Amino acid sequence: MTHKQWKQADKECELGAAKAVAPRKSVDITGDTYRKIYILCVETKGIRFLGTEDQLNRPQG
């Protein structure tokens, strides 16, 4: 996948997740739901979701 293709898929999934959680009121549920919807969207496009920067295990040094 090219960088341009990834940027397009990322934008589409962000929009889809934002639309899905917009009517919800609870911030905690909304954040978790947004993340789940975003990951499902990315994976249905054939992109393996590896996590976010804050979840990466990096050597301490």
Image (cartoon, grey):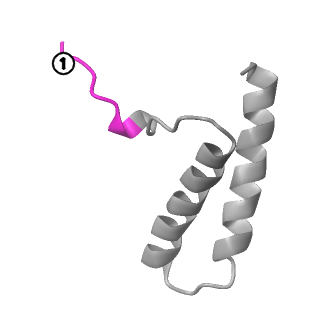
Looking at the image, residue 12 lies above or below residue 20: above
| Residue 4 in picture, x, y percent from top left | 81, 25
Q: Quadrant of residue 10?
A: top right
Determine which residue is flagged by label 1.
Answer: 60
Q: Is residue 17 left or right of residue 8?
A: left
| Residue 11 in picture, x, y percent from top left | 76, 46
Instruction: Give the overall secondary structure of the magenta segment.
Output: loop
Q: At 34% across and 31% down in the image, what residue appears?
A: 56
Q: Residue 49 colored magenta? A: no
Give the amino acid type for the residue marked by disc 1 in the picture. Answer: Gln
Label 1 SS: loop
Q: How crowded is mark 1: few (under 14 residues within 10 Å), some or many (20 or more)?
A: few
Q: Residue 55 colored magenta? A: yes
Q: At 68% across and 73% down in the image, what residue appears?
A: 20
Q: Is residue 27 left or right of residue 21?
A: left
Comparing 48 with 3, the one in front is: 48
Q: In which quarter of the image is the C terminus?
A: top left
| Residue 53 in picture, x, y percent from top left | 43, 34
Q: Which residue lies furthest to the top in this view?
A: 61
Region in magenta? 54-61
Q: In this view, does 42 lie to the left or right of 15?
A: left
Looking at the image, residue 35 lies above or below residue 10: below
Looking at the image, residue 15 lies above or below residue 56: below
Looking at the image, residue 32 lies above or below residue 12: below
Q: At 76% across and 33% down in the image, what residue appears?
A: 7
Q: Residue furthest left?
A: 61
| Residue 60 in picture, x, y percent from top left | 18, 18
Q: In which quarter of the image is residue 52?
A: top left
Tag count in the figure? Answer: 1
Q: Quadrant of the N terminus?
A: top right
